[in-house]
Image (cartoon, grey):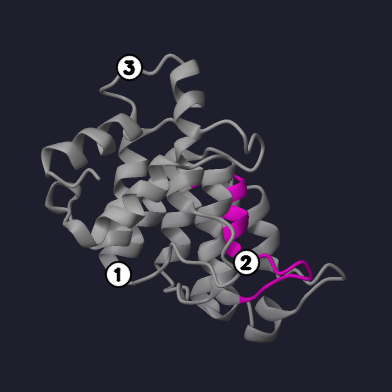
Amino acid sequence: MLSEPTTTIKNIFGQTPAHIAAVIPRTNTISLMKQLLDCDRTPVDMQDATGTTLLQMAAKADSVTMLDLIMEYEPNLTLQCNRVALYEAIKLQQVQWAKRFLYHVIHKGVQDVTSLEDAGDDSVIMSLNCADFELSRALLEYELGHRLEDITVHDRPRIEAVLKASTAKIPQVSVELQLQLRGLNETDNFLTFLRNLLEIRGLTR
């Protein structure tokens, strides 16, 4: 039987047994994670020596199964160290993981998960490099708090900022041009959708 002190004890890297289980999310480690968190859910928000949480590790491993399990133990999604997991997934283009994370966030009614305290990163703009229309749309709708079809003049500055976006890797080249170079047609190009939406709603300058 696992005891609470055992589940929260850390190794030289600041990792609890749960952190170690999250690194390689196989069937046996999923089962082990459940045992650990059933005994004591404290590790669900604990950070290792590098500030990494269980959710961040699950994101890097692209394990939706591990994500779903961890979410059962109510991680504190207002903590930046847990919100960062979404950015990690988007950066690594773990699209299904990011979508599932956002699903949990919306289901739990948590606000501002796409906002990081140190700013700099923009989840919507970062998601454009994933070339996944549904992910970018879901992120922007979550941020705005309504469907994109219901945008008003108050949403225009944010949408224009996305349309003018460039990446940190190639700042002089717009994301839109990069998407065009990938050969995305108009129905798959989120930026084309946004531009058309502004025109339809009569919100172009």
In the image, the segment drawn in magenta is: 46-63
Give the residue displayed 57% in from the left and 75% down from the top. 45
Q: Residue 185 has which mark?
A: 3
User: Mark 2 = which residue?
Assistant: 53
How far apart marks 3 and 2 lie (CA) works out to: 38 Å
* Residue 48 part of the magenta segment: yes
How far apart marks 1 and 2 lie (CA) works out to: 19 Å
Decide: marks 1, 2 in contact (CB < 8 A)? no
User: Mark 1 = which residue?
Assistant: 108
How far apart marks 3 and 1 lie (CA) works out to: 35 Å
Disc 1 packing (10 Å; few <14; some 14–19; many ≥20): few
Task: Identify the amino acid type marked 3.
Answer: Asn
Task: In the rendered view, tell whether residue 64 sits above or below residue 177.
Answer: below
- Residue 10 picture quarter: bottom right
Give the residue displayed 71% in from the left and 69% down from the top. 51
Q: Is residue 7 shown left or right of residue 126?
A: right
Q: Position of residue 101 (x, y in %)?
A: 41, 55
Task: In the rendered view, tell whether residue 155 sits above or below residue 39.
Answer: above
Nearer the observer, 96 or 37: 96
Farthest right residue? 12
Q: Earlier in the sequence, mark 1 or mark 2?
A: 2
Q: Secondary structure at mark 1?
A: helix
Q: Residue 71 has which mark?
A: none
Disc 2 packing (10 Å; few <14; some 14–19; many ≥20): many
